[in-house]
Image (cartoon, helix red, strand yellow):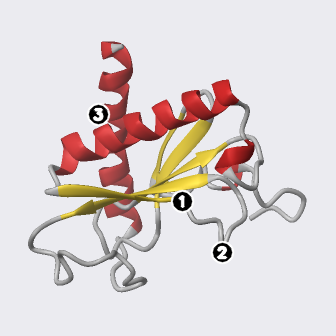
Amino acid sequence: MSDTNPYDWRNFQNAPGFIAEMPHSAAWLLPDQTYRGRTVVWLKTHFDDPADLPTVLRAEFMTEVMRAAEAVRRELRPDRLNYTCFGNAVAHVHFHVIPRFTTDPDWGKAPWRENVATLADNEAKALAGKIAARLEALLTED
């Protein structure tokens, strides 16, 4: 990440798993793909806590989170999507969208396993491209 602004989403736009830029956020696959399709939706403006966002920005950002989630859902067809927004490790507003399948070894439990699986750059790029296409289709439906 950049030394000048660690919260700048553009630090991630060249990552193999980069999905899309939206008006208030950007989305990409996390390198940790323990849960295949695990995506982060990152607010482009720095805020430490979602409660600090102005009401309109909060609503528009959550709409973008849900659009990204729906794109992940349409591409991967998970049995469930989990959402997290902690801020403990990175004090910047962002949501994790985590596809879950009944075939997960820890189905029925919180998705806390980390760094068990990664994707090769070409696999991350291919999956991100498929999710991006789904997201683009959603944006044209609106």
* Side (left or right) of 99 relative to 17: left
> Who comes first in sequence, dot 3 or dot 1?
1
Residues tagged 1 and 2 counted as in contact (Cβ below 8 A): no
Residue 126 circle label: none
Name the mark nearer the viewer: 3 or 1. 1
Residues tagged 3 and 2 counted as in contact (Cβ below 8 A): no
Image coordinates of residue 105 in percent, x first then y, are: 16, 83
Q: Secondary structure at mark 2?
A: loop
Badge 2 amino acid: Ala
Name the mark nearer the viewer: 1 or 2. 1
Q: Can residue 43 be seen in this snapshot? A: yes
- Number of numbered tags placed on the structure image: 3
Work out which quarter of the rendered image holds the N terminus and state it.
bottom right
* Side (left or right) of 88 relative to 83: right
> Could you tell me which residue is drawn at 56 percent across and 27 percent down?
60
Label 1 sits on residue: 85
Distance Cα–Cα, label 3 vs label 2? 30 Å
Badge 3 amino acid: Arg
Badge 1 amino acid: Cys
Residue 134 circle label: 3
Relative vertical location of residue 110 with respect to residue 56 in this rendering, above or below = below
> Could you tell me which residue is drawn at 37 percent across and 61 percent down?
38
Relative vertical location of residue 43 with respect to residue 5 in this rendering, above or below = above
Q: Secondary structure at mark 1?
A: loop
Crowding at label 2, few (<14), some or many (≥20) Cα neighbours within 10 Å? Answer: few
Crowding at label 3, few (<14), some or many (≥20) Cα neighbours within 10 Å? Answer: some
Image coordinates of residue 19 in percent, x first then y, are: 45, 44
Crowding at label 1, few (<14), some or many (≥20) Cα neighbours within 10 Å? Answer: some
Work out which quarter of the rendered image holds the C terminus and state it.
top left
Instruction: Say which of 85 and 136 sits in front.
Output: 85
Instruction: Say which of 87 and 28 sits in front.
Output: 87
> Could you tell me which residue is drawn at 70 percent across and 57 percent down?
92
